[in-house]
Amino acid sequence: MPTPTIDHPTFTFLKGKFPGKKFRATEYRAQSTLIVEPADLHSVMAFLRDDPTCQYNFLSDVFGIDYLNYPTRMPGRFAVVYNLISHARDDRFFVKTFVSPTLPTDGIAEDPGLWVDSVCDLWPGAEWPERECFDMFGIRFRNHPDLRRILTWEEYPAHPLRKDYPLRGRGEREQYGVIDRTSA
């Protein structure tokens, strides 16, 4: 059986524009994903938005993934994935970057290994999903206009979508009184 080729036209344009950069590409069920290094993310995203050949003018989503105990070796424990859409060509394209923690992930310490450049200056709609990635995974975004928690309270002692976070929590709920109908 012949090896399938990855033939999305955006891959070719990116190779020509960034000849010295390390890119990887995948396709799964006709969905193309470009994997970039964190240091190259912002320049690649700006190119994808601004180049008239690419025209990815809409950022549909930003989300995080924790690959802890994943059966295949990944380039990093956490991934940030950007879902881009070109309305002019009716095309969808994913950009993924990996980051790895340099500190233990059982707390909320600011880890220098979990930083990615924000794309809020390119797509203002990235503000809330980037905040959600920060809140749930602890991935921080450089140059984000308002990087603070969005789903949990500011003093929340962890990042609950990390796979090493206990399912029952670490005692956070026990610190707060129960509010019922009569006491509210």
Image (spheres, rainbow, N blue to C red):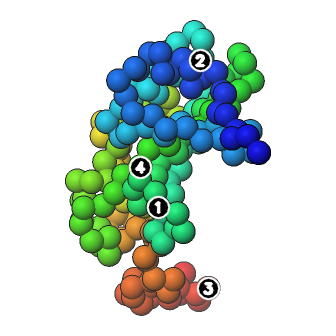
Residue at 51%, 58% in the rendered image? 65
> In the structure shown, which secondary structural element does the residue marked by tag 3 occupy?
loop
Residue marked by disc 4? 98
Of circles 2 and 3, which is in front?
2
Residue at 69%, 45% in the rendered image? 28
Q: CA distance from mark 3 to mark 1?
A: 50 Å
Q: Do the numbered discs 2 and 3 sit on residues whose CB atoms are within 8 Å?
A: no
Q: Of the numbered discs in the image, which one, if any, rests on residue 54?
A: 2
Q: Amino acid at mark 2?
A: Cys
> In the structure shown, which secondary structural element does the residue marked by tag 1 occupy?
loop
Residue 94 placed where, x, y %? Answer: 59, 38
Residue at 39%, 33% in the rendered image? 22
Residue 57 placed where, x, y %? Answer: 59, 22
Q: CA distance from mark 4 to mark 1?
A: 12 Å
Q: Amino acid at mark 4?
A: Phe
Is any atom of residue 131 visible in this view? no
Q: Earlier in the sequence, mark 4 or mark 1?
A: 1
Q: Of the numbered discs in the image, which one, if any, rests on residue 181?
A: 3
Residue marked by disc 1? 73
